[in-house]
């Protein structure tokens, strides 16, 4: 990600920390850019994927919560969370003889592992059915089945009966998690937002996740307050300032008209159910009849300017009235009473469902700004807790008349939470940075506090006292962590089930925080053929994919081997056609991004990759001029693997030899298949401006051992932002696509475009001089039937309004036609906002079938070489980076995205 100020106000790439930021766990602090609202789109349906690791735990937890009158057990002095968690832990010990659940049991005790795995499968079948998209024996064997991810239809989603068109592929996780939420009205219903725009929904406590399709308009939800659940509706915030409502348990959402606060961000959201106390609590199981007075559902929305109140009529806001002025804390609702703090720390209460508010006489102010506020009541006593900037954690047990400091010193405790109906267990999360990143727990109603999330860092030599089973993001990538905004969800029944979000992971606890394990992936038993000793674990998706990918590759030597080139996590490989994955950038000095990978068609096991530590090119936030003094910009090059991507090495002398490649951002690699296998001709592209750097295109004639610069005559002065180098499969001519260059708050003034060389880079010809596409070209594709026809995708560049889309030449580049414009995208998707087109592809067997990938409106396709376009409405994610076709089944394609992982589906909706 660029340094603050490098981006342009019209750059709309989602906020994502750089690799170095992640390793140091330091947020960049750059502001998010405003993004036009996407058009409404029909909801897509995605196949859920089961996690064999956690099925047994989840099934047991669900059974406990659904049983009315179940005893919590334990001593009266022990919280319901801890006592129930201990009971579950004892059950696991009796079954497995260990303390960390089914996954660890499988690793430690082989006999127990088999039985536990089978039992988990039976239980998961009873609760949720078989693995959609893959048979159980195929998953176990890892060698059976059809296309990647298995069949993509016939596994209807949640009673929809429509079938599933797209199935996620990948290792799971890999991005920032935010604002987890659990429903007190629907057993097992949980949600989590992510840093790249996706929102995921689960109906089984996170065993399987579904991406909520982007057409529902959920944007910037990582900055939203937690959801508010009603018996028949859910309220949330999208686009920072708009209320959105769901009437089908979160499967679809409708953005409401703007509120009277305008574009001011909504930072607080609260509600009162019209059915009285109807949700599950520590003393009320799911399904129990409501208690308390009936009335309309009431929703509150708070900004820096005040608090607004509305009643919900038909599940929609029926006018808003301001009831409080200024900013403030969360609103807490307990037994008919409402509590909150104003911006200056004044404590306010309401007895009439928020219509009027008054100041508590004994303690009008707590002496500072309240960063977070929570509370609970068990019928006999009420506990209120607040974190006050400059003071620390404070506590009241008399309705807010008196407050006592229970933890002096404020350490970014910006998220406090308790389960409703119990007053002993509370949590305080220190969010948003590395200086303070602890999750604290109190088991005595907030009197004393202790650390309850103790994760060993990759660099820690002593791990005694830790209680976190780390994810592959920690063990393989070596990232640190910090807690994100509103990071903790506590189950409303108070049974110890917690979800914790970090900038890279999602963790679950089933014992109130005594122990934690990752909840992003299914960790499969090791495979002796998957990299040998020290190899990364085998991971299967459970639907929670938060990665950005540039390409998906099929190995021509082995149909079971497939590969993904990623941003932020580098590279992953599969030995079972996409059913499980291993992170596999080991040996590369540059592990953040593999922009481009080629498989040698003549040498089994050999792959070449363009690797870099600078990420997200060609998105707008990463098109700033190169600064060779900035470490990330000066790290990159070509790496090669001779063992199917299990390990990598630099094939040349990387220490400054005259025939070596420069050490800087490498974005592309191309292989001339007609060259001798023992002396491969390769081309590599480097991203820069050619002032104080060595950007351009380089050629090797010995498989990458030595290189020479072939950039003479290439590019415009000041812009050598080389992004793609490709060799035409028929003419063998060399093509180089140069993307845009941005300045600080300025328009794009130096064009890039598409260039061609007919002599291996000795000379270059500008094919797009004067064409609008040259300002921000993003990708290219060749027509398989006509070597003169080429497509180029382009984004709308600042200073060149509405000049993006898809361009086509039918005469080898002498003339270009804009066959898809921003207005054409609007027409195809029914929207009213412009877009950035980042990808183009042509079907290898049907040159009439062309695809366009956008950043806001997902995937579009044309059946007439681009003359007319349709939205692929079933594709679920907004930002598309590429399309690849399955060589074994040309009716299937793989779509890579910027933040939503990788998806397998049919080339046409009707297939």
Image: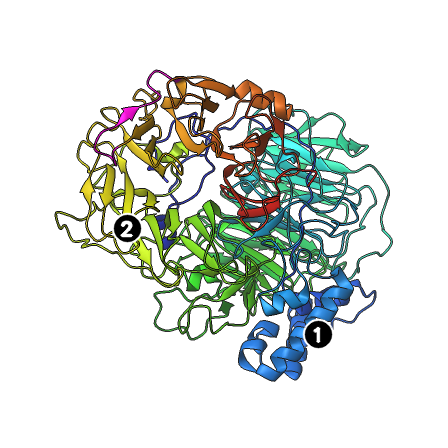
Is residue 272 something that shows in the picture? yes
Left or right of residue 486, residue 63 in this image: right
Residue that numbered label 2 is attached to? 680
Residue at which label 1 appears: 119
Q: Give how far across and how far down residue 604 sits, in percent.
A: 39, 60
Q: Residue at x 26, y 35 (%)?
A: 688
Q: Say left or right for 802 vs 700.
A: right
Which stretch is magenta?
759-771
The image quadrant that residue 120 belongs to is bottom right
Residue drawn at the location 85% of the way across and 48% of the way down: 292
**Depth check: 826 or 291 in front?**
826
Residue 859 place in picture, x, y as percent: 57, 34
Q: Secondary structure at mark 1?
A: helix
User: Could you say which disc has been placed on residue 352 in the image?
Assistant: none
Q: Magenta stretch containing residue 412, yes or no?
A: no
- Name the secondary structure under disc 2: loop
Gap between marks 1 and 2 measured at Cα:
52 Å
Residue visible at 67% across and 72% down?
Answer: 83
- Which of the pair 685/673 is nearer the observer? 673
Q: Residues within 10 Å of mark 1 (few under 14, many from 20)?
A: some
Comparing labels 1 and 2, the label whose residue is closer to the camera: 2
Label 1 vs 2, first from the N-terminus = 1
């Amino acid at each position: 990600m660029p340094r603050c100020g490098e981006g342009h106000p019209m750059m709309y790439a989602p906020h994502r920390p750089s690799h170095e930021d992640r390793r140091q766990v330091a947020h960049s602090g750059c502001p998010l850019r405003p993004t036009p609202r996407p058009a409404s789109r029909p909801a897509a349906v995605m196949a859920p994927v089961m996690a064999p690791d956690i099925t047994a735990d989840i099934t047991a937890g669900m059974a406990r919560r659904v049983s009315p009158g179940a005893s919590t057990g334990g001593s009266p002095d022990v919280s319901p969370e801890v006592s129930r968690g201990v009971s579950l832990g004892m059950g696991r010990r009796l079954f497995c003889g260990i303390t960390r659940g089914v996954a660890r049991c499988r690793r430690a005790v082989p006999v127990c592992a088999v039985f536990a795995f089978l039992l988990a499968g039976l239980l998961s079948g009873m609760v949720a059915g078989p693995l959609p998209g893959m048979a159980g024996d195929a998953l176990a064997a890892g060698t059976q089945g059809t296309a990647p991810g298995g069949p993509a239809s016939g596994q209807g989603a949640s009673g929809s009966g429509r079938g599933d068109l797209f199935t996620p592929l990948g290792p799971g996780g890999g991005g920032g998690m935010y604002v987890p939420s659990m429903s007190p009205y629907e057993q097992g219903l949980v949600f989590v937002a992510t840093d790249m725009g996706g929102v995921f929904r689960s109906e089984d406590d996170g065993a399987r996740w579904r991406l909520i399709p982007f057409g529902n308009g959920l944007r910037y939800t990582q900055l939203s307050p937690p959801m508010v659940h009603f018996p028949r509706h859910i309220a949330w915030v999208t686009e920072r300032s708009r209320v959105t409502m769901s009437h089908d348990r979160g499967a679809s959402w409708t953005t409401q008209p703007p509120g009277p606060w305008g574009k001011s961000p909504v930072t607080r959201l609260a509600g009162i159910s019209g059915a009285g106390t109807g949700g599950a609590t520590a003393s009320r199981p799911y399904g129990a009849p409501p208690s308390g007075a009936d009335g309309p559902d009431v929703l509150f929305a708070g900004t820096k300017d005040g608090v607004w109140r509305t009643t919900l009529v038909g599940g929609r806001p029926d006018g808003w009235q301001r009831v409080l002025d200024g900013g403030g804390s969360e609103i807490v609702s307990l037994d008919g009473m409402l509590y909150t703090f104003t911006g200056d720390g004044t404590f306010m209460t309401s007895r009439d469902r928020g219509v009027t508010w008054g100041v508590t006489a004994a303690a009008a102010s707590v002496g500072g700004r309240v960063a977070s506020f929570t509370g609970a009541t068990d019928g006999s006593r009420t506990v209120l807790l607040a974190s006050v900037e400059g003071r620390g954690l404070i506590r009241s047990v008399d309705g807010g008349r008196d407050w006592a400091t229970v933890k002096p010193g404020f350490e970014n405790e910006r998220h406090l939470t308790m389960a409703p109906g119990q007053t002993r267990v509370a949590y305080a999360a220190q969010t948003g940075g590395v200086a303070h990143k602890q999750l604290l727990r109190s088991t005595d109603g907030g009197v004393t506090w202790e650390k309850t999330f103790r994760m060993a860092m990759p660099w820690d030599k002593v791990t005694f006292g830790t209680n976190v089973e780390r994810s592959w993001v920690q063990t393989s990538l070596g990232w640190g962590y910090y807690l994100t905004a509103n990071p903790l969800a506590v189950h409303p029944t108070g049974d110890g089930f917690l979800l914790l979000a970090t900038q890279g992971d999602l963790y679950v606890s089933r014992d109130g925080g005594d122990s934690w394990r990752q909840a992003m992936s299914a960790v499969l038993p090791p495979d002796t053929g998957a990299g040998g000793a020290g190899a990364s674990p085998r991971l299967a998706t459970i639907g929670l994919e938060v990665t950005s990918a540039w390409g998906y590759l099929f190995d021509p030597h082995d149909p079971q081997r497939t590969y993904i080139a990623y941003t932020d996590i580098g590279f992953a490989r599969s030995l079972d056609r996409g059913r499980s994955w291993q992170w596999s950038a080991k040996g590369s000095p540059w592990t953040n991004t593999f922009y481009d990978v080629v498989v040698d068609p003549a040498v089994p096991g050999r792959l070449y990759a363009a690797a870099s530590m600078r990420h997200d090119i060609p998105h707008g936030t990463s098109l700033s001029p190169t600064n060779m003094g900035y470490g990330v910009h000066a790290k990159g090059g070509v790496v090669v693997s001779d063992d199917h991507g299990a390990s990598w090495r630099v094939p040349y002398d990387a220490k400054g030899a005259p025939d070596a490649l420069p050490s800087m951002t490498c974005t592309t690699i191309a292989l001339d298949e007609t060259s001798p296998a023992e002396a491969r001709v390769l081309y590599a592209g480097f991203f820069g401006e050619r002032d104080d750097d060595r950007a351009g295109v380089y050629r090797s004639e010995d498989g990458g051992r030595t290189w020479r610069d072939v950039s003479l005559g290439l590019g415009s002065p000041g812009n050598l932002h080389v992004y793609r180098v490709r060799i035409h499969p028929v003419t063998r001519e060399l093509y180089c696509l140069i993307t845009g260059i941005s300045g600080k708050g300025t328009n794009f003034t130096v064009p890039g475009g598409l260039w061609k060389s007919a002599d291996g880079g000795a000379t270059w010809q500008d094919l797009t001089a004067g064409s609008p596409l040259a300002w921000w070209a993003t990708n290219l594709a060749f027509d398989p039937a006509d070597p003169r026809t080429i497509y180029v995708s382009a984004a709308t560049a600042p200073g060149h309004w509405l000049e993006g889309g898809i361009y086509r030449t039918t005469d080898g580049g002498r003339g270009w036609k804009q066959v898809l414009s921003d207005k054409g995208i609007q027409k195809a998707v029914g929207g009213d906002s412009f877009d950035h087109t980042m990808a183009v592809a042509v079907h290898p067997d049907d040159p009439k079938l062309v695809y366009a990938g956008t950043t806001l409106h997902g995937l579009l396709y044309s059946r007439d070489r681009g003359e007319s376009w349709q939205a692929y409405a079933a594709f679920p994610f907004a930002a598309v980076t590429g399309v690849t076709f399955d060589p074994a089944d040309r009716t299937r394609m793989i779509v890579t995205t910027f933040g939503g992982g990788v998806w397998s589906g049919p080339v046409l909706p009707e297939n």
